[in-house]
Image: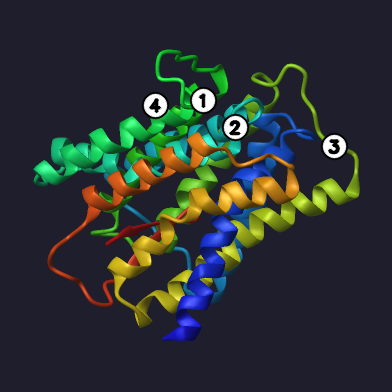
Amino acid sequence: MLKAYIWLTFCVIVWGSNFVFGKILVQDFSPAALTMLRLLFIVLLLIGLSSYKNPIKRVNKADAVTIAFLGIIGVFINQWSFFEGLQTADTTISALILATTPILTGFLAATFLKEKLTIRILVGSIIAIIGIYFVVTKGNLSSLHVEKGLLWIVVTMITFAIMIILTRVLSKRIDPLTITLYSNIIGFIVSIPFAFTLDNPLRISSNLSDWAFLAGTAIIVHGIATLIWNNNIRHIDASKASILSNLEPFVAMVVGLLLLYKPITGPEIIGSLFIVGGVLLSTYQRKKHINKPYLVIRGRRTLR
């Protein structure tokens, strides 16, 4: 049990650090080019995993259309808007905004999957929004200035919530690895022409260390950490694991301090407590589900 918690905590540290990794990478690669290259490494990794575990499976036309939509919206736009936003957006605020994804997912699930929308979700949403407002205004509640980068991070959050909903629908008929492989292949294919049209100018580092950092973070964040999480999640209560995942914004704060020398401010701490508290309130379930498997997509966890 202790070993499982240690490995899961390692995964949370890796995923929380991804905001800082992205901030570093966009200094040397333009966003669309970075998206294309990172998806290339992820696709190669997924093809290797799929070949090792089970042969690539076919899907019917209806599911293929859904997977294509997932690849465009949930993979390409999601990844591109993340890097586009990190060019100017603060890493801690970005992590806090993305931490509210479960709340938006709850609203989308209620709208499209007819799941129940509870008072707890509504109250949790209000608390989280107060936290975001407090962080964005830096404690000065009378002054609100939202920079362009944060708007792209909001797009990342929205597309990620859409990805969760689409994956939840597809996972009833298709195994998670097949969904992830096909959607990332679609996302990669779509990213190729956009890398040469969206980026002005197109920036690709010629430094070998930058390429190694890009490949390493892609493989570790989207590959190794995912495998470790899936391998250890069965040993503990899923609700406790979800609480661990909410520590990502705090990890982003600490890693940002260590690598980017970005100080942690009082408003960030107070706002993050509101946001994480709101998310926990929204996603809390009175009935515990023991050892319920997680579906891991792009380094994020959603209950199957």
Q: Nearer the viewer, residue 23 or 227?
A: 23
Label 3 to label 1: alpha-carbon separation: 25 Å
Q: Is residue 207 visible?
A: yes
Which residue is tagged 4? 133
Tell me if label 2 and label 1 are in contact, CB under 8 Å.
yes
Q: Quadrant of residue 134?
A: top left
Q: Nearer the viewer, mark 2 or mark 4?
A: 4
Residue drawn at 77 percent across, 33 percent down: 27
Amino acid type, callout 3? Ser
Regarding mark 3 in the picture, which secondary structure is present there? loop
Q: Nearer the viewer, mark 2 or mark 1?
A: 2
Label 2 to label 4: alpha-carbon separation: 14 Å
Which residue is tagged 1? 150
Q: Percent from the top left, x then y, of residue 47?
A: 58, 61
Q: How is the image coloured?
A: rainbow
Which residue is tagged 3? 205
Q: Earlier in the sequence, mark 2 or mark 4?
A: 2
Regarding mark 2 in the picture, which secondary structure is present there? loop
Q: Earlier in the sequence, mark 1 or mark 4?
A: 4
Which residue is tagged 2? 90
Regarding mark 1 in the picture, which secondary structure is present there? helix
**Is residue 131 shown left or right of residue 76?**
left
Q: Earlier in the sequence, mark 3 or mark 4?
A: 4
Label 3 to label 4: alpha-carbon separation: 36 Å
Residue drawn at 46 percent across, 77 percent down: 5
